[in-house]
Image (cartoon, helix red, strand yellow):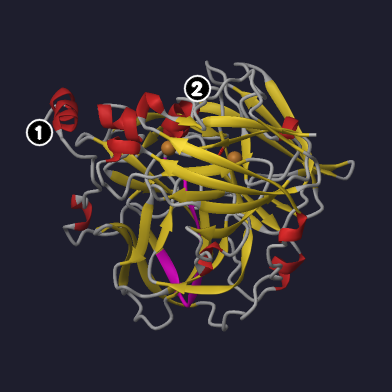
Amino acid sequence: MINRRNFIKGIMAAAALPSLTVSKSYASAAKVENMLAVPPLLEKTRSGGVSRFSISVQEGVSEFVKGSPVNTLGYNGNLLGKTIRAKKGEKVSISVKNNLKEHTTTHWHGLLVPGNMDGGPHQVIKPGETWNASFTIEQPAATAWYHPHGDGNTASQVYKGLGGLFLLDDENSAKLDIPDEYGVNDVPLVIQDRLFSEDGQIHYLTSRQDYIFGMKGNKVLVNGVLEPTFEAPKGKVRFRILNGSNARTYNLYFSNKQSFDIIASDGGFLPKPAKMNSIRISPGERYEIIADFSAHKPGSEIYLADSGYNFMKVIVSSKKGFTGALPEKLAEYDPADMSKVVASRRFYMNGMGNMVNINGRRMDMRRINEYMTLGTTEIWNVVSRMGMMRGGSSDILHNFHAHGTLFKVISRNGKPPAPEERGWKDTVALPDNEVVQLMASFNHKGIFMYHCHILEHEDRGMMGQYIVK
Ligand code: C2O
Ligand code: CU
Ligand code: CU
């Protein structure tokens, strides 16, 4: 057995980024241990035509490896949070009580709400205080999420466990004939890498690389469970995948190489399903996929994997599942209307480590970087320029996320976007020097953030503010 100090030294001495490693738990044909947990729905009460939710941000303890408790943070529990679910047109009111010893905020990532309800760094909730957010859901069905966004302490709070899903429904999602039984064949997967030592503890920022490139782990948690097993019905299963990691971009695929259909991205359904063998997903992004397990014999084992690392086992059961054909059309395709564009801007995402900045500037709570007009549409050209530090590695990417808008990807390096990027997005991966052109509209007033969703970069100032008036 190595002790923790030696383990940390070992990590620090390693030249490369920690890579994902295959856990011993799969090596033996051991019986099922870590079953996938599905976050329950957060209870709501109705009064005065408003759906009311309440969240407590709290400390807790979680066990990822038997006999090794880890101090974690959670919303209404020890780790992560319950799933908030609301419909288009629904008025919601959410009270958030901060039971931590430090300040926090709660941001609704992917929701179109006024700036003062957005839960960004300006909506500070001090220890012991409660913040009330109320807004009306005014956007199409989608898989969104909520997480802390405090000035300078986002990364550590997310890493310790704060994050939850926010699912939106609408008339379209209700009538589409697709798997929609929550937790059965409509299953959220919150994917997060963590740096584990042999004794089952989780470590944060143990090397220079963690500061420079963002925190990467050597193991993956799905819904807070280390390398879990999911029992799938023998049929089509919809996975709502959220990359809730601090810094790692994944290229996800199934170990048997079976293809799957992408049906939705960050902001909702794609115009039509996109058949893929793997999907790149950077921090903060969501993709909904349909995987078909109907051709497998009961008992078959398939893994969800990244770079040769099988981190979630799918066991096909004998229970008959959803076998309907996927709809050919998922959502109205409304092509980008350039005639509405009133301005264009560019965002250069520069540097690494302490040098990160956007257009040469770092986040300053007192400075508004960009001014937008309510009801207008703009073109944004976003480019990552990491410079020499990147050293040619392809799994080190900045990305770009904006609050207060859903955007369309117009092009990447002048080429039309891939099929999976033809729906509404709020976060895009940025391979170095690729010019990503976005079209965004502003329909809510207030101050909103845009930033790299590598949380260590965001905390170090790779963020700016825009105001819509
Ligand atoms: Cu997911 Cu500004 O955040
Ligand atoms: Cu956001
Ligand atoms: Cu970055």
Q: Residue 398 versus residue 320: which sits nearer the camera?
A: 398
Q: Quadrant of the N terminus?
A: top left
Q: Regarding mark 2 in the picture, which secondary structure is present there?
A: loop
Q: Position of residue 83 (x, y in %)?
A: 60, 47
Q: Is residue 413 above or below residue 226?
A: below
The residue where tag 1 is placed is: 1
Residue 35 located left or right of residue 423: left
Residue 317 colored in magenta in the image: no
Classify 15 as above or below 91: above
Q: Earlier in the sequence, mark 2 or mark 1?
A: 1
- SS majority, magenta: strand
- The answer to which image quadrant residue 450 occupies is top right
Q: Quarter holding the C terminus?
A: top right
Magenta span of residues: 231-245
* Residue 152 badge: 2
Q: Are marks 2 and 1 in contact (CB under 8 Å)?
A: no
Where is ligand 3, by quadrant? Answer: top left
Q: Position of residue 271 (x, y in %)?
A: 63, 71
Helix, strand or loop at mark 1: loop
Q: Identify which residue is drawn at 22% across, 57% down.
A: 26
Q: Is residue 405 left or right of residue 208?
A: right
Residue 113: x and y, percent?
74, 41
What's the amino acid at mark 1? Answer: Met
Q: Residue at x 40, y 75 (%)?
A: 259
Question: CA–CA distance between discs 2 and 1?
Answer: 36 Å
Residue nearest the viewer, comparing 328 with 7:
328
Residue 48 visible (yes or no): yes
Residue depicted at 43% across the width and 52% down the height: 434
Give the answer, above or below, for where 63 lies relative to 296: above
